[in-house]
Amino acid sequence: MPTLHLLIKGKVQGVFYRASAKENADELGVTGWIKNTSEGDVEAVVTGSEDQLQAFVKWCKKGPSRANVSEVITTEQEETAFENFSVIR
């Protein structure tokens, strides 16, 4: 299954972005992780089917209601298997 690296920019910290993304990932069945960066962005690595990843990226471009996403940079990376989707603190 493909693996994507996502860098989500905008007002994405302090708006429950990571927790909401985990809920969405669990619903879609994608695995991987998500964390805040020191630059104020959110970073994620996700593995799933093409359809699952497309749906997850689409959600990431909007995020939770209090977020204001300005950009989502996606990069394909080497396939990685994860057991679940986790929030890294």
Image: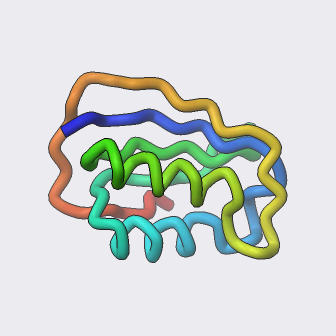
Question: Where does residue 10 sit, x and y in percent of width and height?
Answer: 81, 47
Quadrant where the N terminus is found in the figure: top left
Q: Quadrant of residue 59?
A: bottom right
> Is 46 on the left or on the right of 70, as rendered?
left
**How was the colour assigned to the protein in this rendering?**
rainbow
Q: Quadrant of residue 25?
A: bottom left
**Number of on-image labels:** 0
Q: Nearer the viewer, residue 39 or 49?
A: 49
> Is 46 on the left or on the right of 81, as rendered?
right
Please tell me which residue is depicted at 52% across the width and 52% down the height of the picture. 35
Q: Nearer the viewer, residue 18 or 26?
A: 26
Please tell me which residue is depicted at 28% across the width and 56% down the height of the picture. 31
Question: Where does residue 12 sit, x and y in percent of width and height?
Answer: 74, 57
> Is 37 on the left or on the right of 30, as rendered?
right
Please tell me which residue is depicted at 44% across the width and 63% down the height of the picture. 87
> Is 55 on the left or on the right of 12, as rendered?
left
Question: Where does residue 48 sit, x and y in percent of width and height?
Answer: 26, 49
Q: Nearer the viewer, residue 48 or 22?
A: 48
Question: Where does residue 20 sit, x and y in percent of width and height?
Answer: 56, 73
